[in-house]
Image (cartoon, grey):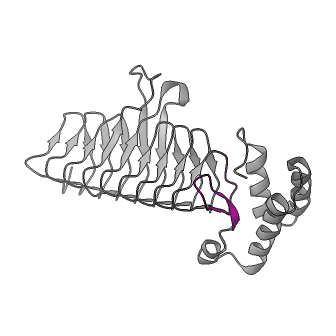
Amino acid sequence: MAGVVIHPSAVVEPGAKLGENVRIGPFVHVGAEVEIGDGSVVGAHCSITGPARIGRDNHFVGHAAIGGDPQDKKFRGERTELVIGDRNIVREFVTLNRGTGDGGGVTRIGNDNLLLAYTHVAHDCIVGNHCVFSNNATLAGHVGVGDWVIMSGFAGAHQFCRIGAHAFIGMGVLLTGDVPPFTMVAGEANGRPRGINSEGLKRRGFDAERIAAIKRAYRTLYVAGLPLAEAKQQLAEQAAGSADVRDLLDFIESGERPLQR
């Protein structure tokens, strides 16, 4: 544990594994079955219980509750875990719960995510990389979130929903269906698709041709007024010339919940 700094008021239970240059702040509790990777910082009053495996260079700012029991009546104390990747920033009062035995046993957070104050990620969720969850964004159990997703403040997702890569969820929107990749959802509480996340795609290096293909696919799915089966047929034709449209169609084909429409 070279370079590890543990504040005298912190409690690190025997069995916890701390990497090099980990810093543990005042009044922190780290459970026995917790692994924290090199260079990570745990701020004041955080609680990290396990089993939990946390990668390197993560920063838990303060008062976060990480790796707690799932909030699920079916949970009976079975061994489940939370897995967090590298370089995530977890702000004040964030709660990240472990998985459930019936849900696969793991809640997983990827790399380079920014989880702002009061974010909640429930049991068995899978969150990708480079996501931003604004204050009070909330995922119910079993939600899947792709890479580069932005959830605005007070947005939420019903259990078992999926949010595709590069999607943008507006402030206060409550999702009850799947959101395809690249889609922007905003408006009233049960938000509706409002186009594609063009600005986000531009910032991530998507060129005009790729964005045009995604816009054409969006219009086919949401604007043309086609039955879903017919829209998927047209998307399959468009996918022959666009890997992005293929990703969108694959997302739709693999879903079990209806689309947010």
**Tag count:** 0
Give the percent coordinates (x, y) of residue 64.
29, 49
Give the percent coordinates (x, y) of residue 6.
14, 51
Residue 34 as seen in the image, left or right of residue 202: left
Give the percent coordinates (x, y) of residue 103.
54, 30
Residue 17 as seen in the image, left or right of residue 67: left
Residue 184 as seen in the image, left or right of residue 133: right
The answer to which of 157 and 37 lies nearer the viewer is 157
Residue 152 as seen in the image, left or right of residue 195: left
Decide: is 144 above or below 14: below
Residue at 65% across, 69% down: 197
Decide: is 70 above or below 46: above
Residue at 28% across, 50% down: 19
Decide: is 1 above or below 135: above
Residue at 52% across, 42% down: 125
The answer to which of 18 and 248 lies nearer the viewer is 248
Residue at far left of view: 8
Q: Is residue 156 magenta?
A: no
Q: Quadrant of residue 205?
A: bottom right
Residue at far bottom of view: 208
Residue at 47% across, 57% down: 111
Decide: is 211 above or below 230: below
Q: Quadrant of residue 176?
A: top right
Residue extent of the magenta highlight: 177-195
Give the percent coordinates (x, y) of residue 74.
47, 22
